[in-house]
Amino acid sequence: MNENPTPTPPEQNPSSEPVLPTSRRELRAESGAADARPVPPTPQGDAPSIPEPAAPAVPGPTAPAYPGAPASGGYPAAPVPNPAPQPGLVPPAAPTEPEFGPANPPIDTPGTLDEGTFDRIREPRREGLALDGTWHQISKKYVVSQVVQDVFWLAVVLIAATVVTVATGEPWAFIPAGIISLFIIASLVILPRQAKALGYMLRGDDVVFRKGILWQRMIAVPYGRMQLIDITHGPLDRVFGVSKLKMVTAAASTGVEIPGLTTAGAEALRDTLIEVAETRRTGL
């Protein structure tokens, strides 16, 4: 009886490529064999280092652009303390207010300024500026001279209206004449109060002039800025002995006219102002 010989596997060519598994079962067997293979030991001290995964970058607050500014990341910036003074550096001095010299005392006025003037100047109901000096007033004859002048112009207006009415036969000329007459009469009523509100004061550095009742005005002219002092008086002013003194400075808006002075008082005031002005200009 013949025995079947065991078939011998075909010889493999060493130069030929390995046969890759083609079925799912062979792929599973290959993966299980790979996992069962022992891992060759590594020498001590050379343990394989496994790199740790890098942490994701988290955007944080950026530095402020200047001390005390809030950070761009939304976090408030910490207050910056004042730097300590370094040795050898002198801190800047604090600004100080300018120091002015003592004011000059009021000048001595001649007694002629108060001869024939009103007794007391009319003060406003509310307290005004506190000035270091004495108010000098104008002459009482100033009111009389102004009344005579206003009455003269009132008569001229009425006579002119009458002449025009007679020449034309129409009374329309009395309409403007009546309006002008009302203004003249109103000025005559308030003239005494206006005259009592006029006054001037000779202080140490300037002369102060005030006028007005409803619309009050006060002007101060430094002695060193005076360029011209003029005295004027008209025909009626000479009759009543009244003069007007005008002080002219470099700025035309600061010129001051003091009406109603007596002739002797205007001359004395002119001489005093010229003397003081020369002294102040020399000091400049």
Image (cartoon, rainbow, N blue to C red):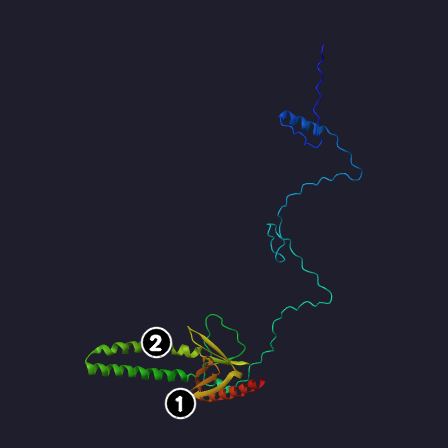
Is 282 placed left or right of 195 in the picture?
right
Q: Give the structural element (helix, strand or loop) at label 2.
A: helix
The image quadrant where one finds the C terminus is bottom right
Which amino acid type is shown beneath numbered disc 2? Answer: Ala
Residue that appears at 48% across and 78% down: 219
Residue 244 occupies which quadrant of the picture?
A: bottom left
Return the residue at label 1.
Answer: 238
Residue at the top extreme?
A: 1
Q: Residues within 10 Å of mark 1 (few under 14, many from 20)?
A: some
Is 211 placed left or right of 153 in the picture?
right
x and y percent of residue 234 in the render?
38, 88
Residue that appears at 29% across and 84% down: 156
Which amino acid type is shown beneath numbered disc 1? Answer: Arg
Return the residue at label 2.
Answer: 186
x and y percent of residue 14 in the render?
71, 31
One can see residue 230 in this view = yes
State how far apart marks 2 and 1 are (Cα): 26 Å
Residue that appears at 23% across and 82% down: 164
Q: Which of marks 2 and 1 is nearer the N terminus?
A: 2
Residue 50 occupies which quadrant of the picture?
A: top right
